[in-house]
Amino acid sequence: MEQTTIEQKTFACQLCGLSSPFTYYGQKPPNTRAIVLLEECFVTQDPFSPDKEKFLVLGSTCSLCSMCVCVGSDCSLFYTKRFCMQCVNKHLDQFPHQIQAELAKKKHSSKAAVS
Ligand SMILES: [Zn+2]
Ligand SMILES: [Zn+2]
């Protein structure tokens, strides 16, 4: 087991600029029962929950370009691995049609919401 450092670390999304201190990076947040995340994530303890086992996933690193991105649907997509939106757009043709359709729908609806 690695010793946890007390030093405050900050996660920053390189796409939307969201930044927040995180307490753990990896797949198995400490103090949780037997949770193993699907990917290595930046995790912080949920400050709004009295339950010490509650935690929030802030973001992760893109599996293609290693950029730090938050889990917001505007910044990244999880499809077997984490992809930042820049890589998703670059390699859109390699994603299944279902994902492509969902992204197209989202773009469409967000445009409609602006007007
Ligand atoms: Zn973001
Ligand atoms: Zn990327």
Image (cartoon, rainbow, N blue to C red):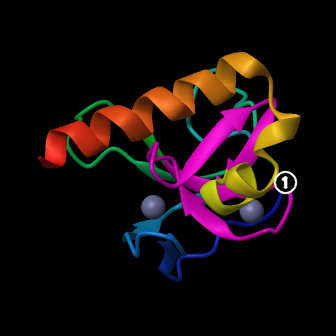
Q: Residue at x 80, y 23 (%)?
A: 96
Q: Residue at x 26, y 49 (%)?
A: 47
- Seen as rendered, the residue at the extreme bottom is 7
Q: Residue at x 61, y 55 (%)?
A: 85
Q: Is residue 7 above or below residue 66?
A: below
Q: Amino acid at mark 1?
A: Met
Residue 25's image quarter?
bottom right
Which of the pair 77/89 is nearer the observer?
89
Q: Position of residue 44 (x, y in %)?
A: 45, 53
Q: Is residue 71 above or below residue 20?
A: above
Q: Quick check: which quadrant has ligand 1?
A: bottom left
Q: Is residue 61 left or right of residue 102?
A: right
Tag count in the figure? 1
Q: Is residue 22 left or right of residue 40?
A: left
> Is residue 72 part of the magenta span, yes or no?
yes
Q: Which residues are magenta?
A: 58-83
Residue 21 seen in this snapshot: yes
Is disc 1 placed on a helix, strand or loop?
loop
- Seen as rendered, the residue at the extreme top is 98
Q: Which residue is mark 1?
A: 1
Which of the pair 34/26 is nearer the observer?
26
Q: Position of residue 64 (x, y in %)?
A: 86, 59
Q: Position of residue 49 (x, y in %)?
A: 23, 35
